[in-house]
Amino acid sequence: MQPFPSPFLSDWERNPQIAQLTVFYTGQIEADFRVELRFTNARRGLLGRVVSGTFPVPFGPHTELLTNPEVVDWGRLDYEAEFAERAQRTGVLPEGEYEVCARILDLQGRQRTETCARFTVLLPDPPELIVPSDGEVVTSPLPVFQWTPVPAPPEL
């Protein structure tokens, strides 16, 4: 899990580098599993939960690398209502500290193992007006505005 991932929901949906889960299967027979993800925040508690589709595992031992787009079906993600409304309205996760826990479940729903990771969402500072300065009277019919730059996400 990136410690400071992008706040933009669209990045979470398509960027496989935001979160990765490595599953080490040490058994000797074929096995199928699902991944349950739980997103929490210290102040608000459980924010979202989703269970993946089934991942088949051939004869073990076997290592499987999964990325967030492979695990999360965004249409099946259950969100806390107020959190979901705010995130959908703005297109970003609210700033703050979060924890995501991944539980490996067998097909009967029994937990086989769990791992958790903490991450922080930081929003970029908004641009500030440089010209015209605060309180300046603008007389031009076509004024030119100049703003401080907004930092681009690292992927750009």
Image (cartoon, rainbow, N blue to C red):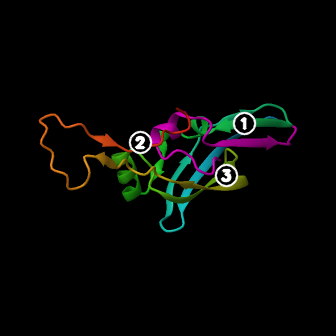
Picture coordinates of residue 31, whole percent (x, y): 76, 38
How far, Cα to Cα, is label 3 from label 2? 41 Å
Q: Which residues are magenta?
A: 1-29
Q: Label 3 amino acid? A: Arg
Residue bearing the label numbered 3 = 103
Residue bearing the label numbered 2 = 149
- Decide: is 49 above or below 21: below
Q: Earlier in the sequence, mark 1 or mark 2?
A: 1
Q: Label 1 amino acid? A: Leu
Crowding at mark 3 (Cα within 10 Å: few <14, some 14-19, many 20+): some
The structure residue drawn at horizontal position 61% and vertical position 49%, both measured from the top left corner, is: 36
Q: Earlier in the sequence, mark 3 or mark 2?
A: 3
The structure residue drawn at horizontal position 44% and vertical position 55%, both measured from the top left corner, is: 94
Residue bearing the label numbered 1 = 65
Picture coordinates of residue 83, whole percent (x, y): 41, 56
The secondary structure type at the circle numbered 2 is loop
Q: Label 2 amino acid? A: Pro
Quadrant in the picture for residue 26: top right
How far, Cα to Cα, is label 1 from label 2? 37 Å
Q: Is residue 73 visible?
A: no
The structure residue drawn at horizontal position 54% and vertical position 48%, both measured from the top left corner, is: 50
How far, Cα to Cα, is label 3 from label 1? 15 Å
For the residues carrying marks 1 and 2, which lies nearer the camera in this image?
2
Picture coordinates of residue 145, whole percent (x, y): 26, 40
Crowding at mark 2 (Cα within 10 Å: few <14, some 14-19, many 20+): few
Instruction: Give the side of residue 2 with respect to residue 96, left or right.
Output: right
The secondary structure type at the circle numbered 1 is strand
